[in-house]
Image: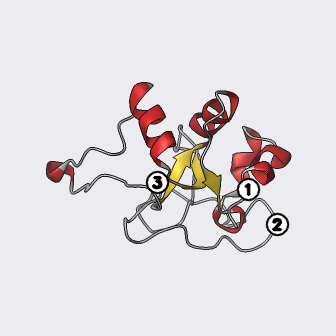
Amino acid sequence: MEKDRAINVLGGQLHPCSVDPMTGYFRDGHCNTCAEDAGSHTVCAVMTAEFLAYSKYVGNDLSTPRPGLRFAGLKPGDQWCLCALRFLQAHDEGCAPKVQLESTHARALEVVALDILEQHRAD
């Protein structure tokens, strides 16, 4: 698998999203992506209790630890490379998490408009 260029939605170098917990399609701490990343794990989202509950409700439980997969579960405040479609779905439902734009890969723009990402920009 060949990674796409590491460019963020603002046109600059892609910044790290999180190494604790380790995130990203490549588990490299960045929201890097490639042609094989069908889910487009490109949005660097800051988890909230509301979003984690929503994600669990729609079938993607990110908060429950899975020791067999070396996954401790996410908690509010953790940053995670979220699938662009899941972010857009949460936005449409009114419970989207905040976004680190400098750490969100430019390919997210194929799914989510920049103005929507900017509405959820983390401080």
* Placement of the C terminus among the 4 image quadrants: bottom right
Scheme by which the image is coloured: secondary structure
| SS at mark 1 in the image | helix
Amino acid beneath label 1? Ala
Residue visible at 74% across and 40% down? 112
Residue 106: x, y in percent? 73, 56
Residue topped by disc 3: 25
Amino acid beneath label 2? Gly
> With 112 as the anchor, is 42 left or right in this view?
left
Residue topped by disc 2: 11
* Residue 55 position (above or below residue 100): above
Q: Are marks 1 and 3 in contact (CB under 8 Å)?
A: no
**Mark number, residue 106:** 1
Amino acid beneath label 3? Tyr
Residue 1: x, y in percent? 49, 55
Residue 45 found in image quarter: bottom right
Sequence-wise first label, 1 or 2: 2
Residue visible at 61% across and 34% down? 90
Sequence-wise first label, 2 or 3: 2
In space, the residues marked 1 and 3 are separated at their CA atoms by 15 Å
Residue 46 found in image quarter: bottom right
| Label 3 crowd (10 A; few <14 / some 14-19 / many >=20) | many
Residue 10: x, y in percent? 81, 64
* Residue 50 position (above or below residue 78): above
| SS at mark 2 in the image | loop
